[in-house]
Amino acid sequence: MNLEDIIQKTKTYYCLECGKCTSICPVARYDSGFSPRMIIEHALLGFEDDLVQNKKLFSCLTCYTCQPECPSDVDFPVFVREARSIAQDNGQYGICAHSGQLQSLARLMTSPAIKQNRLEWLSKEYRVSEDSDVLLWVGCAPYFEPIFEDLEFSALDIIRASLKIMNLLGIEPKLLPNERCCGHDALWTGDVETFKRLAEHNATQIKEAKVKKIVFSCPEGYRTFKLDYPNHVDLGCEVQHLSEFLAEKMGQNGLKFKEIKKKVTYQDPCRLGRHLGVYDAPRKVLESIPGIELIEMKHSGRESICCGTSAFTNCDSYSNLLRAERLSEAAATGADVLITACPKCQTHFRCAMTDKGEEHRPTPKIEIMDLANLVADAIGEE
Amino acid sequence: MAGFEPQIIAFCCNWCTYAAADLAGTSRVQYPANVRIVRVMCSGMVNPIYVLKAFEGGADGVLIAGCHLTDCHYIDGPVKCDAAVDKLRKMLHVLGLEDERLRREMISTSEGVVFARVIKEMVEQLKKSGPSPLKVKMEALA
Amino acid sequence: MTNGENGRKSVLVVGGGIAGMQSSIDLANMGFQVYLVEKAPSIGGRMAQLDKTFPTNDCAMCILAPKMMEANSHPNIDLLTYSEVEKVSGEVGKFEVKIRKKPAFVDWDKCTGCGLCVEGCPVTIPNEFDVGVGTRKAIYIFFAQAVPKKCVIDKREDRPCKAACIDACPVHTNVPGYLKLIAEGEFKAAYKLIRETNPFPAVVGRVCYAPCEKACNRGELDEPLCIRDLKRVPSDQWNIEELEVPVVAKTDKKVAVIGAGPAGLAAANDLALKGHSVTVLEALPEPGGMLRVGIPEYRLPNGILRQEIGYIEKLGVDIKTGVQVGRDITLKKLKEDYDAVFLAVGAHGGMRLGVEGEDIPGVMEGIGFLRAASLGQKVNVGKQVAVIGGGNTAIDCACTAMRLGAKEVTIVYRRSRAEMPASAEEVTAAEKEGIKIEFLTTPIGFSARNKKLAGMECVRMKLGEPDASGRPRPIPIEGSEFTIPVDTVIAALGQVAETDFVEELGVSLSKRGTIETDPKTGATNVEGLFAGGDVVTGPAYVIDAIAAGKKAARSIDQYLNGQALEPEEPAKEPEKFSKEEIEDRKKRFPARDRVKVREEPVKKRVQDFREVALGYSVEEGREEASRCLAGQIEGCIECRECERRCEPDAIVYTMKDETIELDVSAIIVATGLGLYDISPLTEYGYGKIKNVITAMEFERLTAASGPTMGELRRASDGRIPENIAFIQCVGSRDHRHKVYCSSVCCMHATKEAMLAYEHRPGTKSTIFYMDMRAVGKRFQEYILRAKKDYNVTYIRGRPGRIEVNPENENPIIWYEETTSGEVKKFEAELVVLAQAMVPQISEELARTLGVELDEEGFVKTPDKLLRPLDTTRPGIFACGYVHSPRDIPDSVTQASGAAGRAAEAIAGGK
């Protein structure tokens, strides 16, 4: 796809250069060198080289704050995604966080011959079933375990919690022993080739697994399976985020929760919220736990602010300012815990909290927890 | 697997292991030619991504070798290296990569013979194990 | 072919805005008969809502009003306002049209547009004409300069109850009306509304026997409204002393009122409001009659009574106390000195027991005892007190004695509890205070020791056959005599009227000694002499006395004007719900219990004469008042206040739709513009952030006839903003909303910025624009003038977000200044949004007219170049905003064009 095709596809030519996107862009608020309007302007003026050589192209969080409010209906996040693939063809990758290990792991997983040991953590207390028609997607969690061990964060705990909840609901899900990275980061950083190969591997396995539904604890995987896979592969099954799955089940099974006396606030993950419009399900789950008081942040729902990094790319000082701002909003609610429904949000916030911040504006500290863990605590035995 | 010649990437510390490899050469100690040495200033600077990229690029085994614990020119390079390798092993294990494909050694300047032995052992082992399942780029080219 | 009146050909114009009026006038001047249909009650359209017009800054109404008058008075134009097109059939040259005239519930032939009804209406509704920034009443005149200037009742559903409270009330107080006002916290208006029929709202709110509550239809569902206690809420929450005194034209008639009790004062009040000079003569040292000396202070505080009498004095009523007619002045002299006399002396005489020892000191008569206690005279109350009687007066005497220091108070009553005339709640309250009641007991004598009362001999009774009053006759039981040790006895057996002084004029009296009157008019057998209250009826309730006073006042006014006495039409009986209605209402209105009235605790209340009932707090009062069924519907609640006030008798609640059939040759559609709902544009916080308003709201706020009389004040704190931001293209030029340019916003924002500056010189305005579209004659110059002379700055950029500064509620605008690329924030005191405009024509109306609409909802005009005003149906033409986005001069131009096309079509051209 060349720049002209992208302009056609994302209706960029409608742009009136009103600057509404830039005025609400969370990145532009801190990084004066980043302007969605200017990126579009350069594209429309035909400055392809300027565009793809510009490292700022990788600063966009693809958080979808701008697109729904664009009066000209320009799909800026998709424009950025496609432009990044041209940039990759020109050898521009953005600045990869964690020295690119995560991107590398994704590429390694495209190799057909690998036989992963990704389920070694699965102990006997969890019940899974080969014949189940529900699949629980494990995702990057086993890899996050060593990479983010310094952040005192276990992504696998979220998976364990999800399993525990499902078991208590009487569901023994299936887990795939050799699932691959969903390819979300590859796709959004412009590595379409890697994305496609991962998608094909996954699609083959899922078809063989013959399941009716895949449940995700990670909104990125969910978004990728729900919106991006259908453009390339056929899955033949339904996909759902854990929060939606729970919101649906809670009405049916008469689940009993024990009381947890906590004030919480909730971070809408961009992929779950603005990308897929899931705002109510996680809130419904939270509100059904007795003792939980949900206090919304200044910006929430459609207006909520991104955790500051996407696809582990261009994580810089501006990202940290943005995160500190978001953590301040969370702290200002007076909540005891910041609940997220995305392991990536949690990674980025935990990372930001290792930074003391500036002397006059220290980064606030707040306990942070995944929705699945909170629910698992609440339905655990008394 | 007949005729398989494994490819090994060795990250060698400038001050110890690289010199050891040199010594092995000048001492005419024989070792298989399956290794490509990458000289690094310290084993502590070997970022996991180097290793991952080596495997991505088609390496069948990777060796990280540097000074002994107390010999480091940068005080605690080997400790850092051990930590990185520890993380790497965990990651590679999940990926399903056999443990023997990543080898960590401390080889001092004077241990040319040790270097040669390590390479020989690795090559023999890898010949038994066969090619790495992680050959992304090569497969992409194919 | 002819189809209009007098054989003239005719045209239908749909829409009475500036375009519709222009087409109508043009066609009328050509000699055609024009039917101008407008769905609102007045013609004028959107232009009437504007303050000024660009680019000349002329007052919109000054330009529009002459046009409205011309359309109204043109002999060839028939105005059909408050009407809608129902059906169009036929074809060019011979259309058959059905018009539905909506019911205004006001007979416009009678209505003079005086607005008296509007003042009295208790129902407040957001005003559509002021786009919700102001309010109007359920009966309203569309706007101040409306043409035709007639009232309309916004009646949306039938009242769910029968308003039986009004019928049950002797003075027909507008209960649903004032409850609605209380529910909305409009306490002063509520007080004024009650006072329309009752000069003692605060008093009656304490002591009425509340027949309304017994009639209340809600009582058939759960519990009746607590109407009595609600009646005192307005005066509890608001100071009566602040009530304005109306200016009344004086007559030269003088009226004397004898007795300053409720009947006398009610009459004095009404007569004073009619302009007559009223003098009230009162025998006691203070006015108020039984309200003052018969009802103890703990039930009715003196101060409250004094305030309400004080207002009657403010109306010009002269109250002379300490003047007893018959002793200080004769009735005959009064009759000579005054044009009319009203007798309302009440029934203040006590009754004697007629038993042995009644004259021993320590035996007192009840009404005299209460009077002395009320007036602060010395009364000797001992330790052991017996009160004889079973009425409210007996209870009042007992409770008063308790408060004056009695240790033990016993009420002695000859029948049983069931027969007690005192209200049950009063009896229970007295018992709570520790008062004992001896039923079936009658005193037969008193004994003294050392010349002081020592005992009361009583006999027990049993109940026999019913007597003349219908109650069982008490029969003494022989041998049951016993003595109660007492040192004080209060005999509260009833009151009688003292009417000796009227004999000199030969006023006819009943056997009981009360004055005989015509029950409908209050007139006695002596001309010019009227009577009412207890002196006519014997002891009765306060509200009955007030009703009698008002009735007499009406007759006296008629008498003074030389008219024949014409009694008021009798009220209808209070109605009850049918069984079906009860079932239906129970479904519609879930059960809600009465809000309990707070009371002073018993221990505290008996210590002194403090008021026992504490009334409702604001919240409780509003909560209780909101239980009223009538008040819970939208629009008119049919309280009939307007009907009561309307002098020409124009209110017609039963009005129905009316269909008008017309034959016309051509039709012009000029339905104008609507305002696009911008609530989905949440980024600008409209509706949430107080100081973010729309341009039309701005127009209404700056318009001299608007809800603020032209004061541009912001909603959060009423301050006049000096730093205003305008955001353009809100909903326009937006793919998610309206893709087209609304065409007038660049100019009206500039105009509004100028207006703000003219209202307060120095005001800084900042207009956030996409590109300035100044495409008319002298428009660009207008913008230059705004920059140069009116402190207006233009910033290119479309803001993305409005947040609020919590300290001062200033809106903070986030925007990218696209000329520099910087993201900035701008704090303004007020933000005005240029709301997108849409064609005002529903798909239904388009279907009725048989014209097609384009994808944006404008009337489709297939040949845009050569026949730009022709719709898809031959003979129907369009002009103004419904045709395409445009400003006023363009609309007027097009309107004349459409008139020309219509004339051409009638002439048979194509």
Image (cartoon, coloured by chain):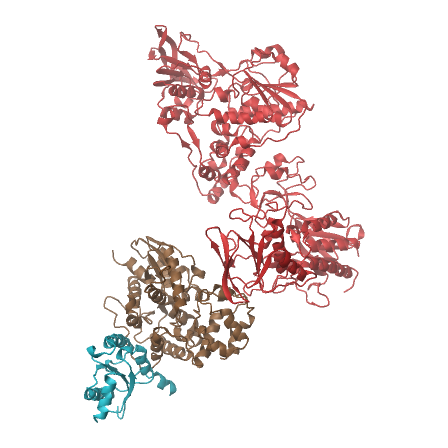
Chain colours: A brown, B cyan, C red
Q: Is residue B60 above or below residue C219?
A: below
**Residue at the extreme top of the image, as rendered:** C450
Number of numbered callouts drawn: 0
The correct choice, above or below, for C124 with respect to A195 in the image is above
Q: Is residue C525 visible?
A: yes
> Which residue is at the front of the view, C761 or C519?
C761
Q: Position of residue C596 (x, y in %)?
A: 42, 35
Measured from the top left, where is residue C56 in percent x and y?
A: 69, 55
B32 sits left or right of C852 in the view? left
Q: Position of residue A113 (x, y in %)?
A: 31, 82
Q: Nearer the viewer, residue C874 or C360?
A: C360
Front position in the image: A175 or A69? A69
| In this picture, residue B5 sits left or right of residue C183 | left
Question: In front here: C238 or C148?
Answer: C238
B84 left or right of C313? left
Q: Quadrant of residue C737?
A: bottom right
Q: Quadrant of the C terminus of chain A?
A: bottom left
Q: Horizontal and vertical percent for residue C819?
A: 55, 67
Which residue appears farthest toward the front when viewing the image? B73
Q: Is residue C43 visible?
A: no
Q: Is residue C594 rendered to the left or right of residue C63?
A: left
Quarter of the rendering containing residue C251:
top right
